[in-house]
Image (cartoon, grey):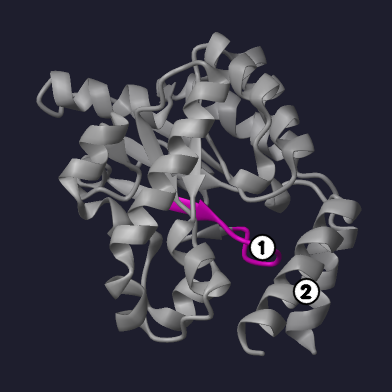
């Protein structure tokens, strides 16, 4: 019951936390951190042999709620902050993505072909899903190429989405990108969960739903204690959006029922 009440508060009653987000941007700047996208940080450590200085990398996974993502982007522009925005097929907004790129930040793909394929074909065993990886890679290439052509800009980093199906199957979406040929075909330099990227961070923080908010600690606590920080956020954790939360909850329920029917 407590978990359900927390979910209802998080989805429908929680006051906006965007002032807190803006306070973080200002605090990081005052503490001497450069605030970068995943793409810019990856290229910086690649080109300087890992010597990046004090950096806060902003990664936004746009699982839902493009409205709040726009508000976060406006705050970043106000403070001269770079960030990466990764969009699912269900949240693609090409105009917004072009605005992000024009501001010097990064807009790219939050992919989930492994989970999508498994649900579509009602595959319930991890081994059965991995056996279909050749087909799933081609699905990824088609989706990625279509988005890149519609966007009219290159996409050089991508980020795996985590779905309930991945957790049940114990198959993560970014297993798909362990194929160097797939990356070459798409021009992908880095996946956001690559060890070659993650090893350069001293701390990786993710936002969480109410009442936790952050794991493993608050980014405010991390400033000054850690030099290179990656901060993963999801717009839905920062401001309630009744319509979007309801849509996502209904879709999740429908997908679970269909998968097990």
Number of marks drawn: 2
The residue carrying mark 2 is 6
Residue extending farthest to the left is 49
| Residue 143 x %, y % | 49, 42
**Badge 1, how many Cα within 10 Å: few under 14, some, many 20+?**
some
**Span highlighted in magenta in the image:** 205-213
* Residue toward you, 161 or 6: 161
The question of residue 12 being in magenta is answered with no
* Residue shown at the point (53%, 63%) measured from the top left: 116
* Residue shown at the point (18%, 42%) measured from the top left: 181
* Residue toward you, 168 or 41: 168
Q: Taking 40 as reference, is 166 left or right?
A: right
Q: Taking 119 as reference, is 174 left or right?
A: left
138 w.r.t. 69: above or below = below
| Residue 136 x %, y % | 38, 59
- Reading the chain from its start, which is encountered first: label 2 or label 1? 2
> Marks 2 and 1, Cα distance to the nearest angstrom?
8 Å
| Residue 245 x %, y % | 81, 58
The question of residue 206 being in magenta is answered with yes
Q: Quadrant of residue 183?
A: top left
The residue carrying mark 1 is 209
Secondary structure of the residue carrying tag 1 is loop
Q: Quadrant of residue 17?
A: top right
* Residue shown at the point (21%, 34%) measured from the top left: 184
- Dots 2 and 1: beta carbons under 8 Å? yes
């Amino acid at each position: 019951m407590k978990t359900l009440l927390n979910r209802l508060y998080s989805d429908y009653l929680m006051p906006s936390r965007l002032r807190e987000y803006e306070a973080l941007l200002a605090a990081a700047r005052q503490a001497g951190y450069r605030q970068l996208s995943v793409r810019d940080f990856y290229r910086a450590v690649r080109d300087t042999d890992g010597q990046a200085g004090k950096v806060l990398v902003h990664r936004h996974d746009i699982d839902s709620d493009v409205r709040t993502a726009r508000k976060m982007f406006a705050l970043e522009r106000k403070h001269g902050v770079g960030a990466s925005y990764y969009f699912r097929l269900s949240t693609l907004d090409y105009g917004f993505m072009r605005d992000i790129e024009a501001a010097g930040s990064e807009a790219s793909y939050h992919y989930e072909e492994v989970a999508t394929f498994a649900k579509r074909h009602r595959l319930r065993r991890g081994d059965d899903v991995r056996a279909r990886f050749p087909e799933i890679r081609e699905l990824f290439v088609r989706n990625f190429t279509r988005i890149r052509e519609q966007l009219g800009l290159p996409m050089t980093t991508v980020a795996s989405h985590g779905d309930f199906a991945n957790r049940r199957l114990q198959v993560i979406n970014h297993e798909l990108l362990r194929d160097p040929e797939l990356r070459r075909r798409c021009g992908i330099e880095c996946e956001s969960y690559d060890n070659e990227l993650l090893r350069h961070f001293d701390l990786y923080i993710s936002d969480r739903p109410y009442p936790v908010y952050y794991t493993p600690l608050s980014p405010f606590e991390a400033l000054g204690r850690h030099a290179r920080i990656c901060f993963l956020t999801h717009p839905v954790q920062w401001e309630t959006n009744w319509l979007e939360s309801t849509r996502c909850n209904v879709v999740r329920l429908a997908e679970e029922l269909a998968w097990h029917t």
